[in-house]
Amino acid sequence: MQIKNFKPRKYQETIAKTCENNNTLIVLPTGMGKTKTAIIATIARLQLYPNSQILFLTPTKPLANQIQKEFLESTTIENITVFTGEVTPTDREKTSKDTTVIISTPQTITNDIINSRIDLKKFSLLILDEAHRCVKDYDYTWIANQFNKISKYPRIIGLTASPGSEINKIKEVCKNAFIDKIEVRTTEDEDVKEYVQEIQIEWIKVDFPEELKEIQKFLIDCYETKLSQIRVLNITKKNEFSKKELLNMLGAMQARMARGEKDFRIMRGVSIVAEAIKVQHAQELLETQGVQSTLIYFQKLYLESETTKVKSVKNLVKDLNFHSAYLKLNQLKDHQHPKLIKLKELIIREKELNPELKAIVFNQYRDQAKIIREELEKIQGIRPKLFVGQQKKSGTGLSQKKQIEIINSLKTKEINVLISTNIGEEGLDIPKVDLVIFFEPVPSAIRTIQRRGRTARTEKGKVIIMMTKNTRDEIYHWVSFHKEKQMYNILSKLKKDLNFKEQATLSNFSEVIPKVNILADSRETKSQILKKLKDDGYIIKTEQLDVGDYIISDKIAIERKTPEDFINSILDKRIFSQIKKLRENFSSPLLVIEGEEDIYSIRKIHPNAILGTLASITLNYHVPIIYTKNGIETANLIKVIINKEKLGKKDEYPIRIEKKPLTTQEQQEYIVESFPGVGPNIAKSLLKKFKTIKSIVNISKEELKEIENIGPKKAEDIIKLFEEKY
């Protein structure tokens, strides 16, 4: 197996050499051949272990298809397969055994590992594309751990243009991916310079319009009022807050309320901080986007205030300064921000300079992106298209298939300007874009590098960054600039000294694991439970279950709900049908409510309704309820249940409790409840009317139908049970 159709660059060969002996994080500017470097490392690995396999993970399906194409064009490897959710699990299992290179989304591989459809022992290399995602609970983290533990010859490579600007974040990426070497190159490095395409960067500054300063003043005064109220409540000692700090403060107070704190200051503080965040967002829209986007935001809040019970919205629209800003916005609703006017001038200028122009305009707000598209459509020769994520917001949302179609239409010149939200910052397969325009700077090194990297991939390109003077536009620009500089400084230091000492964990110690098949609902693969159980050696199979979320044996099944899902299931009345099915199909059912949120504060529902539901589940349906804090605790609960069920373990700390035997009445009710479609209430009705179980068994279908809540179908099912031979 060899490379073909390209000659490795010197820095690519140097980096690939490091990858032969070390788990390596490769940090290269976008367009400098990270995938090609991984291909060189892949060939070396396959030559060292000829019968091994390679696993290449990438966040999205379009990227997976792009990488497969690059592998086919650049190597003599024949068996290169893309795994996504569109390929059936059965086909993936068959294909995985005979494929040399598997290119997949991480979610798909996670499912296959959990279900034992893929054997990581034979894989000699794991490549993590966009490796900066290897943090927290993202699937990269778990897959890397599984690979490092199971593979006979583990080697991991991470690819990224920007791993982050905080040392803890970069260290987390390295630790989660078991990285022991960092290879970083910038456009200024000697072995890279000759390959760097020229990027011309232009900063366009506009003045903040005088007519908008009055609105700005109303919003500033409104915001200061909220800060004063926060200080009066004495919930913090700080005087000034960034958006991130306000969000963190809000989250901390909501967590305290969820734990049951009834402090008035906290409850009032939640509302005021939420108001401050909304005012700050309105000010950002006004300064960086313009009147129209800001007005749309205000209109949404005012519309919401008519129906919502959320105090922060109701209080904010009544605020004098906020309402004054709203009135002034309505007077200026046709006003265009100077950046929008300048953007149209820039597009016209660049189109005249280059009639074949292909450009991307980045804007992080969908409402403003739609406005930009509408304005650019008015320019002769400009064929713009909106490019947004899959989630439906503000009436827009694109499926992955539609996203690919739009990218292809840019390649074929059917369109020539892409107006993109942050979905276009990462992983677009656009080999040649002449111009990238930032409608606003973003305060993130990663996002800035990703945006900038959309041009000058194979030929020289141009980047224009627009900003409004003396607003947060300028602040965000300098934040991003310093974060990028800081990122390279950190990487340089870590490159010289990257050392993670393995810490002792429970997984380092062996324990007896029963060979148990746990059947789980396929929708549970996003939780941490199955990953934890798989880590601990349990055999798991997932499929869409009609009853319960986890089936441990023919007797035991668990229905798992988050506090929010539990409350929603009360409101939409599905909780009792789910619990009834659970009780009818399993002799030892269990309801687990997982999460630390206070179930009484999630929705506007009377506490008695919640208490009544809990009481009915335990007393009428005889289903125990257990509360857990998180997925890990739920997984540990399942392990304890398995140990007791399969291994018959005794309690380590036995408590002497004499079990009270069931009364005759309880036994009779229990037997009748086992009939098809019969719950606690119907069972009692039958026993009251016919007195004995023997009498019930001998009644006719007509007599049975006369009982309240038993219809013809239910009566037929019950009689069929009585009369059918065993």
Image (cartoon, grey):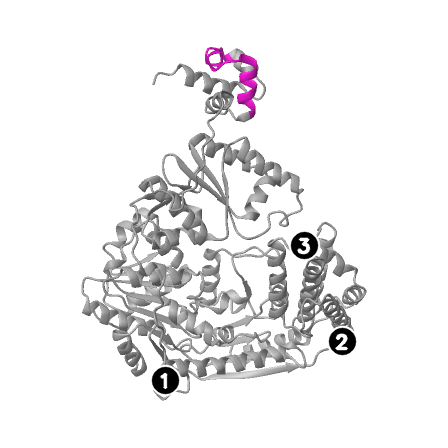
- In the displayed image of the protein, which residue is found farthest to the front? 656
**Residue on which disc 1 sits:** 192
Q: Earlier along the polypeptide chain: callout 3 or callout 1?
A: 1
| Vertical position of residue 28 compared to residue 713: above or below | below
Question: Where is residue 605 shown, x and y percent of the image?
Answer: 66, 43
Q: Main secondary structure of the magenta part?
A: helix
Q: Position of residue 417 (x, y in %)?
A: 53, 69
Magenta segment, which residues?
681-701
Left or right for 196, reference 604: left
> At 54% across and 62% down in the image, what residue appears?
388
Q: Helix, strand or loop at disc 3?
A: loop
The amino acid beneath tag 2 is: Lys
Q: Residues within 10 Å of mark 2 (few under 14, many from 20)?
A: few
Quadrant including the C terminus: top left
Tag 2 or tag 3, which sits nearer the N-term?
Answer: 2
- Say what amino acid the circle numbered 1 marks: Val
The residue that disc 2 covers is 213
Q: CA distance from mark 1 to mark 2?
A: 47 Å
